[in-house]
Amino acid sequence: MLGERIAALRRRAGISQAELAQRLQISASAMGMYEQGRREPSAEILVALSRAFHVTIDYLLTGSPA
């Protein structure tokens, strides 16, 4: 699940939801909803997440490397 992968990557990076949200210039509540699977990130946010964590968008969406 996308939200679980985002949360795992964030924890591995040692940052809070609020810190990640600030880096992506979104609200902390939006970040929480992405991680809970209650909201889907836009294509722009997926690109920003992939850059922030140095992973492919394919990995974020499917869990498999490119």
Image (cartoon, rainbow, N blue to C red):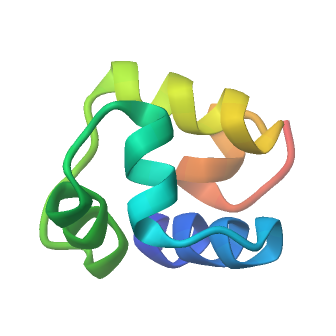
Q: Is residue 42 left or right of residue 22?
A: left
Residue 34 location in percent, x, y?
29, 63
Q: Is residue 53 left or right of residue 36?
A: right
- The answer to which quarter of the image holds residue 39 is bottom left
Residue 58 location in percent, x, y?
66, 39
Question: Would you place residue 14 above or below residue 55 in this image?
Answer: below
Of 23 and 1, which appears nearest the observer?
Answer: 23
Residue at image point 69% right, 78% down: 11
How many numbered marks, from 0 up? 0
Residue at image point 53% right, 23% down: 47
Question: Would you place residue 42 above or below residue 38 in this image?
Answer: above
Residue 31 location in percent, x, y?
30, 60
Q: Is residue 31 left or right of residue 7?
A: left
Residue at image point 37% right, 19% down: 44
Residue at image point 65% right, 68% down: 15
- The answer to which quarter of the image holds residue 30 is bottom left
Image quarter in which the C terminus is found = top right
Residue 7 location in percent, x, y?
55, 75
